[in-house]
Amino acid sequence: MSPEAQSVPITLTLNGKSQSASVQPGLLLADFLRDSLLMTGTKVGCETGQCGACTVLLNGTSIKSCAVLAVQANGQAVTTIEGLSVDGAFSPIQQQLWEMHAVQCGYCTPGMVMCLTDLLQQNSQPSEAEIRQWLDGIMCRCGVYQNAIRAVQAVASPAGAGGR
């Protein structure tokens, strides 16, 4: 049987736009996003779901895309880091991460942004303990966690940047 015959047709909404493709049943969502749809903001780090660099939103919930098959996203809405900006402007959490110096090498940044976006959508006023719990799934070798906490607090504060 040819590889094409083994392909599975899928359709998903990527950053608000419908996308259709045929994929191999074992293709990881992270690889599909990067290699087929050219969403290279989604990083692949450990490929075991431990580092969080590949975090995207699936129907609004943060997931590690290296732990999900592309076929599992069929009929779903996927948001990548490329889908957060509006008219080229940073989202509030992206802006605050930048202003609070919570971006260094940038490898974990897309995953961190997606994770914290989910947190702020679920809880617009998270405590420091809640922020730390959400950051627990993101491995940052540069160690910007304290600045990331400050960034979330700035977005969450009444005088802060506000949410979407």
Image (cartoon, grey):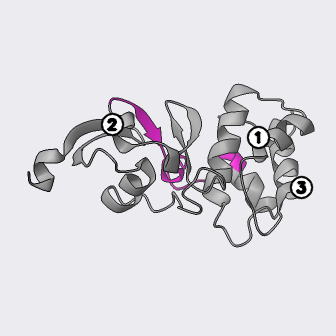
In the rendered image, which residue does mark 1 sit on? 134
Mark 2 / mark 1, whichever is N-terminal: 2
Disc 3 versus disc 1: nearer the observer: 1
Crowd tier of the residue under label 1, counting other residues whose Cα lies within 10 Å: few below 14, some 14–19, many 20 or above? some
Is residue 77 rendered magenta in the image?
yes
Give the CA distance from mark 2 to mark 1: 26 Å
Mark 2 / mark 3, whichever is N-terminal: 2
Give the CA distance from mark 2 to mark 3: 36 Å
Q: Residue at 62% across / 46% down in the picture?
A: 114
Q: Nearer the viewer, residue 136 or 120?
A: 136
Q: Residue at 76% across / 40% down in the picture?
A: 134
Q: Which residues are magenta?
A: 75-93
Secondary structure state at the residue bearing disc 2: strand
Secondary structure state at the residue bearing disc 3: helix
Left or right, residue 138 beside residue 16 = right
Is residue 155 rendered magenta in the image?
no
Left or right, residue 155 beside residue 44 = right
Q: Is residue 6 above or below residue 158?
A: below
Instruction: Tell me the kind of residue under disc 3.
Output: Gln
The quadrant of the rendering that contains the C terminus is top right
Q: What percent of the width, then of the height, locates residue 19? A: 28, 42
Left or right, residue 7 beside residue 75 = left
In the rendered image, which residue does mark 2 sit on? 12
Crowd tier of the residue under label 2, counting other residues whose Cα lies within 10 Å: few below 14, some 14–19, many 20 or above? many
Instruction: Tell me the kind of residue under disc 1.
Output: Trp
Instruction: Tell me the kind of residue under disc 2.
Output: Leu
Tag 3–tag 1 contact (CB < 8 Å): no
In the rendered image, which residue does mark 3 sit on? 146
Q: What percent of the width, then of the height, locates residue 1? A: 8, 51
Mark 3 / mark 1, whichever is N-terminal: 1
